[in-house]
Image (cartoon, rainbow, N blue to C red):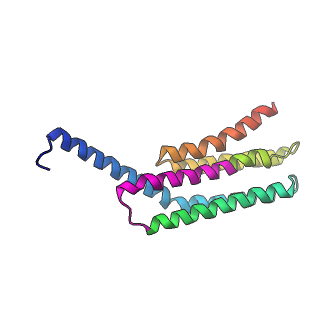
Amino acid sequence: SPSRSPTESMQAAQHDRKQHVRAAQVRLLYDNANTGIGVTIIAASLLARFQWSVVQHPLILGWLLYMLVTSAARFILARRYRRKSLSSKEISGWSAAFTIGAGLGAAGWGAAAILLYPEGRLMNQVFLIFVLGGMMLGGASLLAPRPEAFLTFLIPTGLIPSMRLLSEG
């Protein structure tokens, strides 16, 4: 506007550019959501099947149900995001919702390190840790656009198994 100084105009332009970049980052998170959800469902199902003979069935079924419900909720969230015409003011809410979903998924993977860790079964323990490491690697690439989503997923998914392994001695 004519009443703005050059400095104010430059600051407004920088603010607009930051808003556009953030909107693009959040859009990228949601564009990759189905990949992450699909991998979660497949990996959780395979892990549950592999641990079936060495972990109590109610623990496996409860954990798998949690992972499937969380994945379904994240899928519904991603569909709603895609159907909306978003203004830059709405991006923060969508970013926060995605981050919460990533955190819920991370809580499930972290819980797997406790619930699905079979004592005295080295092959099953190694497989569990391998799956968790793979989820972290995949999650890192899919969640890299926004640090809050990235860290919310990686910290619990990596920290809980690490603490478990350190406690084993």
Q: Residue furthest left?
A: 2
Task: State whether residue 52 appears in this view.
Answer: no
Coordinates of residue 8 in the picture (x, y in percent): 20, 41
- Left or right of residue 64: residue 89: left
Q: Residue at x 48, y 61 (%)?
A: 31
Characterize the magenta stretch by its predominant secondary structure.
helix
Check residue 90 for magenta coloring: yes
Range of residues picked out in magenta:
84-108
Check residue 162 for magenta coloring: no
Q: Residue at x 76, y 36 (%)?
A: 165
Residue 169 vertical placement versus 68 (above, below): above
- Left or right of residue 39: residue 63: right
Q: Residue furthest bottom?
A: 83
Q: Residue at x 76, y 37 (%)?
A: 164
Task: Examine the image and state in which quarter residue 69 appears.
Answer: bottom right
Coordinates of residue 55 in the picture (x, y in percent): 86, 52
Task: State whether residue 20 appears in this view.
Answer: yes
Of the pair 113 and 88, the residue shown nearer to us: 88
In which quadrant is the C terminus drawn?
top right
Of the pair 79 and 169, the residue shown nearer to us: 79
Q: Residue furthest top?
A: 169
- Left or right of residue 64: residue 33: left
Residue 10 vertical placement versus 65 (above, below): above
Total tally of numbered discs in the picture: 0
Residue 41 vertical placement versus 147 (above, below): below
Coordinates of residue 54 in the picture (x, y in percent): 87, 52
Coordinates of residue 133 in the picture (x, y in percent): 67, 45
